[in-house]
Image: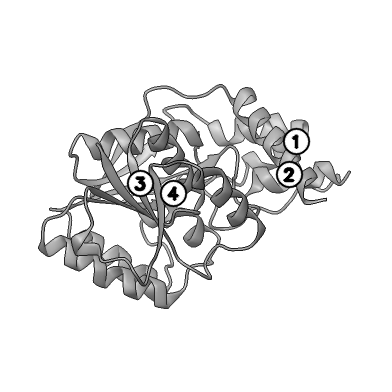
Amino acid sequence: MERATILGIYDFIGYSLCRHMLDLGVEIDGIHQSGNIGGYFTEEKRLEIGRNANFSEISLEDWEAERAEGFLFVTLFESLQTRNGTNELLEALLSKLENRHLKKLPTAVVLPAYFAQENMDLRETETKISRYINNRQSTLLTIYLPTIYGPWQPEECFFQQTMSHSSNNGNKVPDISKWEWTHDCLYVDDAVKTIKEMAESGQQGQYILSSGEQDRWLQCAEELIDQDAAMLRNEVVAPVIKETIQVRTVGENEQISKGLTRQKEHFTRIQDSRV
């Protein structure tokens, strides 16, 4: 893969995927949905990847999907998991995806795992996305992600909240959002490497990424909150995944303690830089 476009460039997954591919020498056009993920963290990310000569940023309004070169990655993981996606953005996106579908241009859509669950209560626009994906599998690669942890994990996520509570000397275990996938988790570098490999291999259809390890999310929680994690075990009920979705196990998982340590160190550095 020599060139790719990433829509959602400052999304947790989009940004991490961009960095991974820039390290491999891929030229990246990054599309930022203004008003979706903004502020201090976006500027930090922009400064970090903006120095790379292989990266260029364009707005959603200026992006012409049907003329884009190379592979398109649509990363909606953070905006949908944190419920920050706008109906206007998603409606515009579906129109652009249809243009690519008609021209048979390669596209990967990355979504949070709750989209893969049977009988999930989705918002109207989310239902449209799910319906579109089911009707366009001939040209789409759709990848559903469990909880992803590591540097730049969204502040609403349980692991990041736990670190924030700890840094403020708080003892209360934070609440778990109903949208967080507590059945499995992956370190961010392992997830984006797998996404890139699947896209490059020409795979199509729907897949949910798996660590292949039992209770991995709970193991991460136990690493962070020790004995308090026991109360979480009773809350985990195995989900029912749609029959059209295949499970793709990542090749290798980062050691939990190392991954969480990197996330903690990054969180501390970012917090210190804001003072």
Q: Name the N-terminal-most of marks 1 and 3.
A: 3
Residues under numbered marks 2 and 1 in contact, where contact means CB atoms less than 8 Å apart = yes
Frontmost of labels 1 and 3 is: 3
How far apart marks 1 and 3 lie (CA) works out to 38 Å
Q: Of the residues shown, which amino acid type is indicated by label 2?
A: Thr
How far apart marks 4 and 3 lie (CA) works out to 11 Å
Q: How is the image coloured?
A: one colour
Residues under numbered marks 1 and 3 in contact, where contact means CB atoms less than 8 Å apart = no
The residue drawn where x is 24% and y is 60% is: 133
How far apart marks 3 and 2 lie (CA) works out to 33 Å
In the picture of the structure, the residue carrying the numbered disc 4 is 14
46 is higher (above) or lower (below) than 269: below
23 and 54: which is toward the camera: 54
In the shown orientation, is residue 21 left or right of residue 246?
right
Q: Of the residues shown, which amino acid type is indicated by label 4?
A: Gly
In the picture of the structure, the residue carrying the numbered disc 3 is 28
Q: Of the residues shown, which amino acid type is indicated by label 3?
A: Ile
Q: Name the N-terminal-most of marks 2 and 4.
A: 4
- Residue 149's spot in the image, x, y percent? 56, 39
266 and 227: which is toward the camera: 266
Residues under numbered marks 3 and 2 in contact, where contact means CB atoms less than 8 Å apart = no
The residue drawn where x is 25% and y is 68% is: 96
Residues under numbered marks 4 and 3 in contact, where contact means CB atoms less than 8 Å apart = no
46 and 118: which is toward the camera: 46
Give the secondary structure at mark 1: helix
